[in-house]
Amino acid sequence: MEYPAPEYGLVDNNCPYIFEKNKLAEIAKARGANNCWLNLEYELLRGTIFITYQPVNNNLDSLLRDAQKLPLQHTIKADVIEGDVYVNPSRDTYGMFYEVSGDAASQAQFYLTDSVNHFMTGSVYFRAQPNYDSILPAAAYLKNDIRHLMETVKWKENK
């Protein structure tokens, strides 16, 4: 399948972070959740990037543990889970990007933190039976959008 070339725009939504998102995605607030939890809905791809945000309050270790456990929940269906360390000192963002191959429910996950005040996670899910071959083009497209999102996150008090 062919998808449109991504065009990115800034998201500033009264949360402690900003980032750029693909204009193909619509922002929806996560139901019943923290005001800074967002869903980036890609109707054309039948997929969503779920974003959560939590302030760090002397709980960085537990936030990291929880974020690192999430990709492991897909090991039953995943063929491979690869983790790439992400470091961007100029934006004070550090984290991991996990790429999941196989018939897992989520094809990509990430977390970002400044290690002091902020903690963000994200994961991709599709509204379709997880069949890796059939969702591969859409999964690759959203993985690129996640990487762009990670590269453009900026914590507001660090402007």
Image (tube, rainbow, N blue to C red):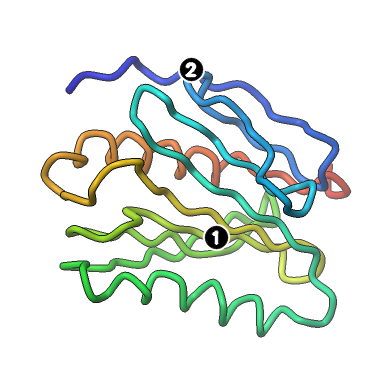
Residue found at the far right of this picture: 157
Q: Amino acid at mark 1?
A: Val
Give x and y (percent) for residue 37: 69, 49
Identify the secondary structure beneath mark 2.
loop
The residue depicted at 65 percent of the width and 43 percent of the height is: 38
The residue depicted at 23 percent of the width and 75 percent of the height is: 76
Vertical comparison of 32 with 22: above or below? below
In the image, 73: left or right of 50? left
Residue placed under numbered mark 1 in the picture:
87
Residue 134 occupies which quadrant of the picture? Answer: top left
The residue depicted at 27 percent of the width and 34 percent of the height is: 138
Which numbered disc covers residue 143?
none
In the image, 63: left or right of 47? right
In the image, 20: left or right of 34? left
Looking at the image, tell me whether mark 2 or mark 1 is earlier in sequence order.
2
Sort mark 1 into few (<14), some (14-19) or many (20+) by Cα contacts within 10 Å: some
Of the pair 107 and 150, the residue shown nearer to us: 107
Residue found at the far left of this picture: 133
CA gap, disc 2 and disc 1: 24 Å
Q: How many marks?
A: 2
The residue depicted at 64 percent of the width and 33 percent of the height is: 28
The C terminus is located in which quarter?
Answer: top right
Residue placed under numbered mark 2 in the picture:
7
Give x and y (percent) for residue 61: 67, 84
The N terminus is located in which quarter?
Answer: top left
Give x and y (percent) for residue 69: 46, 78
Identify the secondary structure beneath mark 1.
strand
Residue 40 occupies which quadrant of the picture? Answer: top right
Q: Amino acid at mark 2?
A: Glu
Marks 2,1: beta carbons within 8 A: no
Sort mark 2 into few (<14), some (14-19) or many (20+) by Cα contacts within 10 Å: few
